[in-house]
C-alpha cells in the first residue's frame, strides 16, 4: 500500500501510516490536475488539504486509488459523487480545528473593534496616535453568526463568555446554545448584528451568499468576517462597502482563487484597505489542530484500508464492523438496487463460504457491504462477484 500526502500535512500522519505498514510519499505543495494524475500512479491513498482539486478526470485516471483523506474540514475540493461512484470513500476532520478557527475569529473581532491594524501601521511609520476614537470593546456587542455548525456553535459559546450578545442563522433547525438567539432569516440577522461572521459549508448552493445587497443591509459601521469559503462573498462589493465607510472593518481568510504554492500570485480588491485583516487560509493552521487532524484523518484511512470501516465518511455509507482474527473480509461497493445482497450471498453459498458477520449500508444510489467469512475467497468467487452488473469495487482483507 502507498499513500501520497500533499500540502504539508502533519508528519504524525506519516507515522500512523508507517506503523500500519503503508509506504508514504510527502510533498509540500498542492498539485495541478495533470501533475496530480501523474503523481497518483500506483497510489492507494491520497491525503490533501484545501487547495488540491480532485476532479472526476483525476479519479477516472487513478485506478489504484481506494480512499481520499481531506486533512481539513472542507471537502468541496473533491468531486464526492464521482469518487463514491468509483467506490472511493472520502474522509475529513470535521471537529479537529474547530477551536483554532474560533480563537482566530474572536482575536480578529477584537483587533477590528479596537482598530489595531491602523494603530500598528501608524506606529511602524513613526506616528504616535493615542486617540481612542473609533475603538470599542466587544462586550455588549451583537454578534451575528451565519452557519451554526461545529465552528459556529462553539464560537457562540465562547463569544457569549466574553460578554457578546449572540444571534445566529442556519438553514437547518439547530439548538441554540446558552443565550444565543435564533434568527428566522439572514435578513433578520443582518438587521440586528454589529458584527457578522460566516461559517457555512462549501455546498454549491452557498456560492454568492454575500454580495452588495447583503452588505447594504448590514448595520452602519458593522464588522464583517469570512473564515469559511472564498466563493461565498463578492469581495468587490465588500471593498466598496469598506471604502464608503458603511462597513467599518473586515477580516478574510479564504478567497475564490488561492495560490497552490507559497510563492503563487495573490491579488484581492481588499488589499491595502484600512482596518482589513487578510490571512492566507490559516483559520485551522495551529500546531495543535494540524497534529490532531494528521492523526485523525490518517487513522480513518488506515482503518478503511485494514478493516473496511467507513465511519464518518462524507460520501459513502457509514459501516463499522468488528474484525475477528482469522476471518477473511470482503468489502463491496455496488449500485443500490434490489437483490444485490441476495446475489452476493448466493455466490458465497454456492462456493461453501459460511458467513460469520455481515453489515449493509446504503447512501443514495450507492450500497456498501462488509462480509466476514471463515474461509479465504478463491479466485473464482472473486471473479463471480466482480461479474455482477451492480459491482463497483471489491476488496479482500485478511
Image: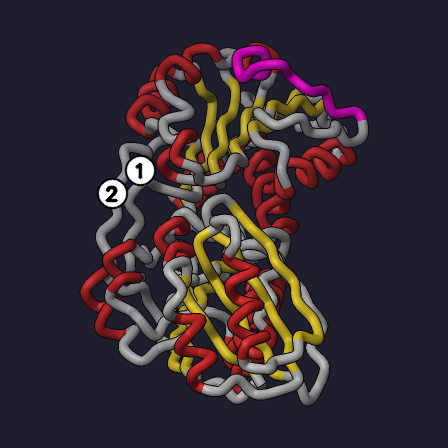
- Residue at disc 2, secondary structure: loop
Relative vertical location of residue 217 with respect to residue 357 in this rendering, above or below? above
Residue 176: % across, % down? 74, 27
Is 31 rendered above or below residue 259? below
Q: Quick check: 177 left or right of 221?
A: right
The residue most toward the right is 178
Q: Nearer the viewer, residue 79 or 338?
A: 338
Q: Residue at x 39, y 49 (%)?
A: 81
Give the quarter of the image for residue 45: bottom left
| Circles 1 and 2 in contact, beta carbons < 8 Å | yes
Q: Which residue is mark 1?
A: 271
The quarter of the picture where the C terminus appears is bottom right
What's the residue at 56%, 51% (across, down)? Answer: 362
The image position of residue 166, as x and y in percent, is 69, 25
- Label 1 to label 2, Cα distance in Å? 7 Å
The disc placed on residue 267 is: 2
Q: Is residue 312 above or below residue 326?
A: above
On-image quarter of the N terminus: bottom left
The question of residue 50 being in magenta is answered with no
Res 73 visible: no
Nearer the camera: disc 1 or disc 2: 2
Q: Which of the 4 quarters of the picture holds residue 163?
A: top right
In screen coordinates, is 378 left or right of 43?
right
For the question of whether residue 14 can be seen, the reply is yes
Question: Which residue is more in the foreground, 124 or 245?
Answer: 245
In this view, the residue in front, 398 or 188, is 398
Q: Which residues are magenta?
A: 179-189
**Residue 270: horizontal and vertical position, in percent?**
32, 34
Amino acid at each position: 500500500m502507498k499513500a501520497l500526502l500533499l500540502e504539508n500535512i502533519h508528519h504524525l500522519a506519516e507515522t500512523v501510516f508507517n506503523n500500519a505498514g503503508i509506504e508514504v510519499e510527502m510533498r509540500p505543495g498542492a498539485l495541478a490536475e495533470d501533475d496530480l494524475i501523474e503523481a497518483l500512479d500506483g497510489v492507494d491513498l491520497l491525503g490533501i488539504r484545501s487547495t488540491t482539486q480532485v476532479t472526476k478526470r483525476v479519479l477516472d485516471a487513478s485506478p489504484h486509488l481506494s480512499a481520499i483523506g481531506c486533512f481539513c474540514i472542507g471537502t468541496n475540493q473533491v468531486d464526492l459523487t464521482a469518487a463514491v461512484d468509483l467506490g472511493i470513500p472520502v474522509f475529513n476532520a470535521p471537529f479537529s480545528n474547530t477551536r483554532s478557527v474560533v480563537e482566530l475569529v474572536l482575536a480578529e473581532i477584537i483587533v477590528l473593534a479596537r482598530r489595531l491594524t491602523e494603530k500598528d501601521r501608524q506606529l511602524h511609520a513613526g506616528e504616535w496616535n493615542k486617540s481612542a476614537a473609533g475603538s470599542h470593546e466587544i462586550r455588549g456587542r451583537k454578534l451575528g453568526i451565519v452557519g451554526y455548525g461545529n465552528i459556529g456553535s462553539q464560537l457562540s459559546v465562547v463569544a457569549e463568555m466574553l460578554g457578546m450578545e449572540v444571534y445566529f442563522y442556519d438553514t437547518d433547525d439547530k439548538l441554540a446554545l446558552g443565550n444565543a438567539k435564533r434568527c428566522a432569516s439572514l435578513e433578520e440577522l443582518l438587521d440586528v448584528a454589529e458584527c457578522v461572521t460566516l461559517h457555512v459549508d462549501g455546498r454549491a448552493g452557498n456560492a454568492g451568499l454575500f454580495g452588495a445587497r447583503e452588505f447594504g443591509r448590514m448595520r452602519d459601521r458593522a464588522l464583517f468576517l469570512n473564515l469559511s469559503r472564498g466563493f461565498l462573498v463578492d469581495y468587490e462589493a465588500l471593498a466598496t462597502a469598506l471604502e464608503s465607510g458603511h462597513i467599518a472593518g473586515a477580516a478574510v481568510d479564504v478567497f475564490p482563487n488561492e495560490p497552490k504554492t507559497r510563492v503563487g500570485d495573490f491579488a484581492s480588491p481588499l488589499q491595502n484597505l484600512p482596518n482589513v485583516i487578510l490571512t492566507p487560509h490559516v483559520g485551522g493552521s495551529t500546531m495543535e489542530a494540524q497534529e490532531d487532524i494528521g492523526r485523525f484523518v490518517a487513522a480513518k484511512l488506515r482503518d478503511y484500508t485494514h478493516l473496511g470501516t467507513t465511519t464518518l465518511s462524507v460520501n459513502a455509507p457509514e459501516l463499522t464492523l468488528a474484525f475477528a482474527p482469522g476471518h477473511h473480509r470482503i468489502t463491496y461497493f455496488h449500485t443500490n438496487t434490489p437483490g444485490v445482497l441476495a446475489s452476493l450471498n448466493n455466490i458465497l453459498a454456492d462456493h461453501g463460504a459460511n458467513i460469520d458477520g455481515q453489515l449493509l449500508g446504503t447512501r443514495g444510489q450507492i450500497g456498501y457491504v462488509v462480509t466476514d467469512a471463515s474461509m479465504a475467497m478463491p479466485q473464482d468467487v472473486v471473479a463471480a462477484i466482480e461479474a455482477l452488473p451492480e459491482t463497483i469495487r471489491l476488496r479482500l482483507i485478511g
